[in-house]
Amino acid sequence: MAAEEDLKLEAGADGEAPAGGGKKKIIIIAALCLLVGVGIGAAVFFILGGGSSEEAAVEEVVEEVILPPQYVVLKPEFVMSFQVGTRQRFLQTSIQVMTRDQAIVDAMELHEPMVRNEVIRIISSQEFETMRTTEGRLKLQEELKDALTAIMEQETGSTDIEAVLFTNFVMQ
């Protein structure tokens, strides 16, 4: 009988487990969860290439600085004649170059004769009927952009010409 009384004292009056063991289990489970969480967080940090905070700060600053566009107007307007069959046809166009780089603006002004010569050469080589279509004008814009970008790369080392824009395009 004494053995039964000892068991009842250890288990409590209702036959339940002692309260201290339940708290220990909760603390152990919480500690394990915390350890697993820290391990997963560290793994994700290293896998995703957690660079130094200085590199991240420099990248953020570089991305935030966006310069406003600058437009270089090629003056005077370009007027060219085309022989289409037996008729004489004319094209008058005003062109502006969009960039965000001041070095390009300065180089376009310095090398204006070379730029104008290239524009005239490219436009003169086009078919008059092709330039009357939207696709023909878009193709001409791309050709001019590529040619001017090549000139600027040769002269300044920069290729930051974003667009060649026709602000006036009259065909007669």
Image: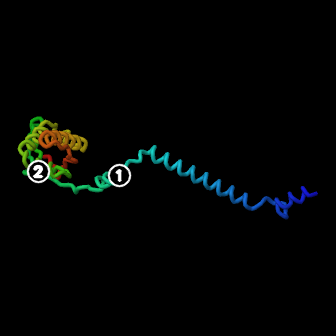
Q: Between residue 143 and residue 114, name the one nearer to us.
A: 114
What residue appears at the point 7 percent right and 45 percent down from the top-left corner? 111
Q: Quadrant of the N terminus?
A: bottom right
Residue farthest bottom in this picture: 13
Q: Between residue 45 and residue 164, name the one nearer to us.
A: 45
Tally of numbered tags:
2
Kindly identify which residue carries mark 2: 106
The chosen color scheme is rainbow
Assign a secondary structure to mark 2.
Answer: helix
Rendered image quadrant of residue 150: top left
Residue 4, position as x, y percentages in the image: 90, 57
Relative vertical location of residue 83 with respect to residue 40 in this rendering, above or below: above
Instruction: Identify the mark nearer the N-term, 2 or 1.
Output: 1
Relative vertical location of residue 135 with respect to residue 24 in this rendering, above or below: above
Label 2 to label 1, Cα distance in Å? 33 Å
Residue 22, position as x, y percentages in the image: 72, 58
Q: Is residue 87 left or right of residue 137?
A: left
| Residue type, numbered disc 2 | Asp
Q: Between residue 172 and residue 138, name the one nearer to us.
A: 138
